[in-house]
Amino acid sequence: MSATPQKNRATRRVLAAAAGLATVGALVAAMPAGAQDRGHGHGHGHGHKPRTVDVQLLSFNDLHGNLEPPAGSAGNVSETQPDGTVKAIPAGGVEYLATSLRTARKGNPYSVTAAGGDMVGASPLLSGLFHDEPTIEALNGLDLDVTAVGNHEFDEGAAELARLQNGGCHPVEGCYEKGKKFKGADFPYLAANVTKEKTGKPLLKPYTVWKKNGVKIGFIGVTLEGTPDIVTANGVKGLKFHDEVETINKYARELDRKGVKSIVALIHEGGAPASTSYNYDCDSPGAGDGISGPIVDIAKGITPKVDALVTGHTHQAYVCTVPDPSGKPRMVTSASSFGKLYTDTTLTYDRRTKDIVRTSVKSANHVVTRDQAKATDMTRLIDRWNKLAAPIAGKPQGWISADINGRGSTAPEKPLGNVIADAQLEGLAPADKGGAEVAFMNPGGIRADLVHKASGSEGDGVVTYGEAFTVQPFTNMMNVVDLTGAQLVTALQQQVSGSNEASPKILQVSKGLTYTLDLTKSGADRVVADTIKLNGEAIDPARTYRVAMNEFLAGGGDGFAALGEGTNKLVGASDLDLFNAYLAAHSTAAAPLAPPATDRITVIQ
């Protein structure tokens, strides 16, 4: 999901302190030896080698530092039952993901594990507080062999991404554990389509080759070309992002010339299946008929030299075959998000041609259920970091009377979106704080639900700092700007037009702003202009309004160019501080905050 790409509290100091991209050149040189040669050591070679060998490809994507099982509806996957009903299954958490992957590898001497990006960033407090070092440590323990970068890998800039790869303590906050230095990722991060503006050279390795007993599989990793549109400007400073198809085709030719004929592309871009059930058949009625979105055109353009595509970004679950440019079906997979699913793909490798027998590729998504044994090494890791986080994480911020859904809500207007927008308006309405009259929140920046059930020992209904942080992990600074009524109307139309036409991004709006969203229409017309009102009055195109939003939206992020045109900017407190202040002001143990009505946007389906 596109999201506000953002930085933990210390990072804005880090970006000022980091000496540009100087450290990044070290990435390629310092790639861990053997990271690409690790064959997991399951099984042994035999005296005679059969012509083909089945290679197991295990994959997942969009973990976002969710080491503990995600809470509430954001931690469920949908499963269609034989009778057609849909069941919600609680899933995810690295203790279970580790067990699932280790169990799946048994009896598969050739097994490689790959990921589709966004392993870190927009992470819950347990990982985010420590600049995602706990997640990299967990991925090392999961025996991840390779991942593509996603847009969130750039949230804290290229120098911090280099540190996650190479290790070393944080440049501002130092080492978190006495006598322990962060080792970095022992798997390569691939970013084939990201180059340095000054030199034109790749930021990271474009590809890696996994080898075992003469079997060779090349992995090329890319993030979506539109990464700069969904990451704050500081995060992508000095970098260029290139076309996914052209980049993959270029490096596939290079691998082919080097004798690597079996190739998998790891792409941090995805699609939308026609059903949210993980076990939906998206090849019905025909190959790839049940999926839409950017990945379809990308898949159709990627050279037939590539044998399978592992994708991500949209947080959806699918296993589809989309025809390659020669018309042959090719596997395209995605495993939801937050470690709730993993994909198990069988690649049959022909030792004579050194290529994958595409007609025999099989793939399926599997639920990371929470009724299996926990991996004890992951439990120890979580406990260790939780002890460090506890003094901050457990502080109560407010009380709620029931679940207030954000990430888990599929409606255009989300109850938690209303709470967040109201918190931003209230905090920035005073004249000395910006004089805001209306506030907008981008839906991708709401990372979780507020869940009534206690996550620890705090008691049901208590919202802790850790839970609030998980909802708003970016610690974006708030801006209040001048926009004309005409610009406001244009911004609302940009939710459903331009780059957002195919998959609308509906802004969450503060109380007092109302309008009708007519989904039977197309493009900008879906926002019915003459219904837009503020406190009951029609928006005056010529009047200037004071508008509050986070720095990501104020920079025109998520395709909202009109919001980037604001003038007379005042920088306020962070989004998280305003959210916590609102919870404190509007709830007590005796009078908890109730889920608000969702009556600001009238939706016509």
Image (cartoon, rainbow, N blue to C red):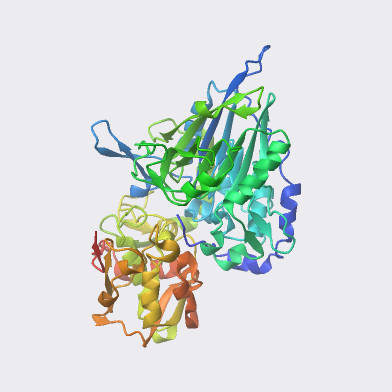
Left or right of 169 in this view: 226: left
Residue pictured at 40% horizontal, 79% vertical: 487
> What is the quadrant of residue 234 in the picture?
bottom right
Q: Nearer the viewer, residue 254 or 235?
A: 254
Q: Quadrant of the C terminus?
A: bottom left
Q: Nearer the viewer, residue 396 or 544?
A: 544
Residue 209 is situated, as x and y percent measured from the top left of the image, at 67, 36
Disc tally is 0
> What is the quadrant of residue 466 in the picture?
bottom left
Left or right of 498 in this view: 142: right
Work out whether residue 436 can be spotted.
no
Direction front: furthest residue: 326
Whether 415 is drawn above or below 287: the answer is: below
Whether 574 is drawn above or below 208: the answer is: below
Q: Quadrant of the N terminus?
A: bottom left
Residue pictured at 54% horizontal, 32% vertical: 57
Work out whether residue 132 can be spotted.
yes
Residue 496 is situated, as x and y percent measured from the top left of the image, at 37, 64
Residue 357 is situated, as x and y percent measured from the top left of the image, at 56, 27
Residue 515 is situated, as x and y percent measured from the top left of the image, at 27, 72
